[in-house]
Image (cartoon, rainbow, N blue to C red):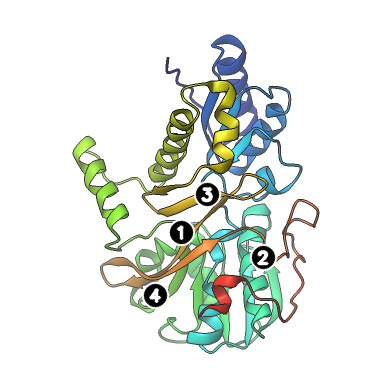
Amino acid sequence: MLFLGCSDESGSRALAEARRLVEREHVQVLVGLETSAAALAVRDYARTKPDVAFLIGISPAAQPTLERPAPNVFRFTTNALQWSAGLGAYAYRTLGWRRAVVIGNDFDFPWAEVGGFVAEFCALGGDVVRRMWTNAPKTVPAADGYFLSEFIPQLLPPAVKALPVRGNLARRVLIGYASVGFARQVLGARAIGVGGGSAAPLGSSLPAWTAYLASYRQAFPKLSFLGLGVFFSTSMEAALRGLEQAGGDVARLQSALRTLRFESPTGPVRLNGHRQAIASNYLLQVTASGLRTIRTVPEVDDSYAGRFSPSKPLPSRTYPPCTRGNAPAWARSR
């Protein structure tokens, strides 16, 4: 039997709905959870209900599976730490950056997204000369390039205005996943050619992705495409495949999920030892008509060659340090 719950961005509402579904409706598998606060609240609750499987839909925060991970919490979608994968190598090798400044709002989502960029860029030999935690920088030091993490649409133009960059931004600026989609809209022609990271291959012709888009349009002909929906679809697909692999036995589901591998609309996915997705990331480029995928970064985990794990610090204002060597596998292959 299928039960539905409705939440918002807050952890308190997500926790209340999880409790209702588990304790009143007696669900054995809970799929959903959006936002960092929701995933963190339900992760802690999950420890009290070890027989229930909790599958996170999409949450930027690294913590739900990287900090004190609960054995019955699974995330088959990537997080903000992984959404930067490939950008450090792109900046260093393709754009020729050697000195970078990173700018992001001061909370865990940008800390993670910037942390992935810093780990990869510095491992290849780059230097991050300043980390600026503000949504409204006044002056920004000179550098070869600038990585702008999570900015809402109205904050991106003033942030770009503060940069010591004139004209087209393509070789001087990279933009995080939450912001790259509206860069053309708010920055105009200056944004054409700018790159960014993405958990979804937007604008690509990859078969699994185009098949998903076709099925979405067939199912919802009157709705515009909602980009986040694919991640909830992936989580539900994981739950259904896990149940099938377990022969319909919910008691065996969690074991099945730990070893599950399948092709999602955004590419192949499997879990690591703390039940976080290992999946592809994508490099996007802003065009005059929208976004296009220019590179696939395969097999992205959340460790960045051992810099992050449940036994190490979480991404923060200062962690990871900018250290050379030991680049992640996907960065070494380019």
* Residue occupying image coordinates x 74% and y 46%: 67
Q: Residue under circle 3? A: 270
Q: CA distance from mark 1 to mark 3?
A: 33 Å
Q: Residue under circle 1? A: 153
- In front: label 4 or label 2: 2
Question: Residue 63 vs residue 253: left or right?
Answer: right
Q: Up-down: is 100 above or below 184?
A: below
**Image quarter of residue 330:** bottom right
* Residue occupying image coordinates x 74% and y 76%: 322
The picture places residue 185, in percent across and down from the top left corner, at 35, 64
- In front: label 1 or label 3: 3
* Residue occupying image coordinates x 26% and y 54%: 210
For disc 4, the neighbor class at 10 Å (few under 14, some 14 to 19, many from 20) is: many
User: Answer yes or no: do the residues labelled 4 and 2 have beta carbons within 8 Å?
Assistant: no
Q: Residue under circle 4? A: 191
The answer to which of marks 1 and 2 sits earlier in the sequence is 2
* Residue occupying image coordinates x 74% and y 63%: 317
The answer to which of marks 2 and 3 sits earlier in the sequence is 2
* Secondary element at image label 1: helix
Q: Amino acid at mark 2?
A: Gly
The picture places residue 102, in percent across and down from the top left corner, at 63, 73
Q: Up-down: is 107 above or below 21?
A: below
Q: Up-down: is 66 above or below 297?
A: above
The picture places residue 320, in percent across and down from the top left corner, at 74, 67
* Secondary element at image label 4: helix
Q: Amino acid at mark 1?
A: Pro
Q: Residue under circle 2? A: 115
User: Answer yes or no: do the residues labelled 3 and 4 have beta carbons within 8 Å?
Assistant: no
